[in-house]
Image: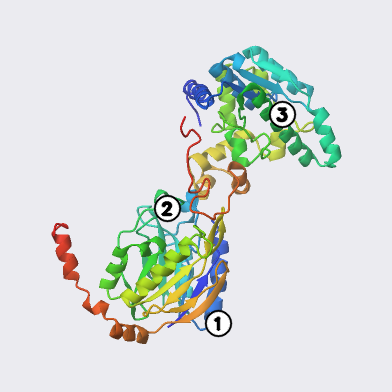
Amino acid sequence: MQLDYKFVSEILVNFIKEETEKIGLKNVVIGLSGGIDSALSAVLAVKSLGSDRVFSYALPYKSSSKESVEDAQLVANEFGINLNIIDITPYTEPFFNSLNVDTKLRMGNVMARMRMVTLFDLSSKHGGIVLGTSNKTELLLGYGTWYGDLASAINPIGDLYKTQVWELAKYLGIPKKLIEKKPTADLWEGQTDEDELGFSYKEVDRLLYHMVDERRSFDELIAIGFKETFIRTVSERIRRNQFKRQLPIIAKISHRTIDRDFRYSRDWGY
Amino acid sequence: MKVYISQLKPYLGNIEKNLLKHEEEIRKALSKKADLIIFPELSLTGYYLRDLVPDMALRLNSPMIKIFENYSEDINIIIGFVYEDEEHNFYNAAAYFENGSLKHIHKKVFLPNYTMFEEARYFGAGDDFLAFDMMGEKTGLLICEDALHLSSLYIYSLQKVKNIIIISNSPARGIKPDRFYSQQLWYDTIRFISRNMTVYTIFVNRVGVEDGITFWGGSMVVDPFGDVKYQAELLKEMGDIVNIDDSSVRRSRITSPFYRDEDVTVVKRYISNMGSL
């Protein structure tokens, strides 16, 4: 679980530069939520491309906490990141009203997708690509909105567990306040990831590491000391959310079906 | 010999649920007084296993093996499964159970690893084609791609088989106005095997969809004359009884004694000369 964060940071900084520039683009666009994941992605981007090539946006809805925007501002100031604040309320609220969006889940998903639409539009304006901010823990647990916050062009932190995100953030000198605050999707008042998930990131990352990276069997995980229900809950979440981690499945008809036997790398020809 | 062809639709990566399906099919086969039930390739696990392969694997001492041994007190069974050997290699395999015991395992030799296929990434390859005695008749067991190679057929022929059993997970692809590639490939192959080896060929293919891939079913039995004795419907999960008999093999070998006239010394001479004839 421990990493050489100096080396990891070098890899990620180089990753962002190469994968942005080789396709002929200069800039990246990123949503800064005030949380640690987007702060880390943005800081890596600035280290990679320089602050004039990173366009970050805080995208609060009227119910978002003031603290989130302040924390986004804090990290932006610290690292000289160009930050704009766009209130998504004026175009999100009419959507809620028109479609009678009345549950927390639907509202949360719509907000995440409105932010996605906003960022992709701005990426076109800036001639840039949208930088992803989902970590490995979220991706495995499917704790994110499909085509919302999970949507991006490149993701530097998708192979880092949340606890590794914290460690890398520490290494890079991201303000303690962001590292120590409770992770939240901030979709509604008082929401925290750990309450919603029902376990802490520290606990689940340890399990995920043994289960996914070390490929420990169920019996081995029990022997290490994990509770049976915890193992089952987490494995089931991973299984159920596989669809969020891949392209839509395509019905095969021909000899060459996209992504099945029509296989090229994204960096094909660059 | 009464053979029940189980054109099954397995669940992907759920052995427990697949066992229930197998049990249900075994009950149907028993009610139709079948001597043998044949399930498709990887019937216990589903096809696109990828990283699930080690989780789905059975060893010789796995309780699941015992379960099928017990069922085989009443009916002989061929299943498709992931076999893990003592060295922890994983194989796409088929097992034959007869009279209460596991009698034979065939490990798929030719693993397709091109276009849409990635089997060699996940499985080790078997290295032999050994005929086995199935209720007194020499039989060769092949898993899908195995049957598309001449070597497997020739080696079984040299071992005097009268039946070739092919269990398969063939996906529908290359669809044209009046036919599709994989069906044509298989039906031509099965007829060729039957007619030229003068054997019964039993092809058991699965149905169902996995991640956009449709398995087309259409299981088939062709007699030693090359005549279709049975053809299952396309795409439909179903099971049926087919009769196979040694007397057809006999009559076909009177009409077309290719088998008698085959001369292995021709092959032997070629190989011992390292091909430099």
Q: x and y percent of residue B96 in the render? A: 40, 70
* Disc 2 secondary structure class: helix
Q: Are dots 1 and 2 on a single chain?
A: yes
- Residue contact between numbered discs 2 and 3, judged by CB atoms under 8 Å: no
Residue B210 in view: yes
- Give the label on residue A28, or none: none
Return the residue at label 2. B119
B165 lies left or right of A156: left
Chain holding disc 2: B
Return the residue at label 3. A118
| Mark toward the viewer: 2 or 3 | 3
Q: x and y percent of residue B67 in the render? A: 49, 69
Chain holding disc 1: B
Within-10-Å neighbours for mark 2: few <14, some 14–19, many 20+: many
Return the residue at label 1. B31
A36 lies left or right of B215: right
- Amino acid type for the residue under numbered disc 1: Ser
Q: Are dots 2 and 3 on a single chain?
A: no
Separation of residues labelled 2 and 3 (CA atoms): 42 Å
| Mark toward the viewer: 1 or 2 | 2
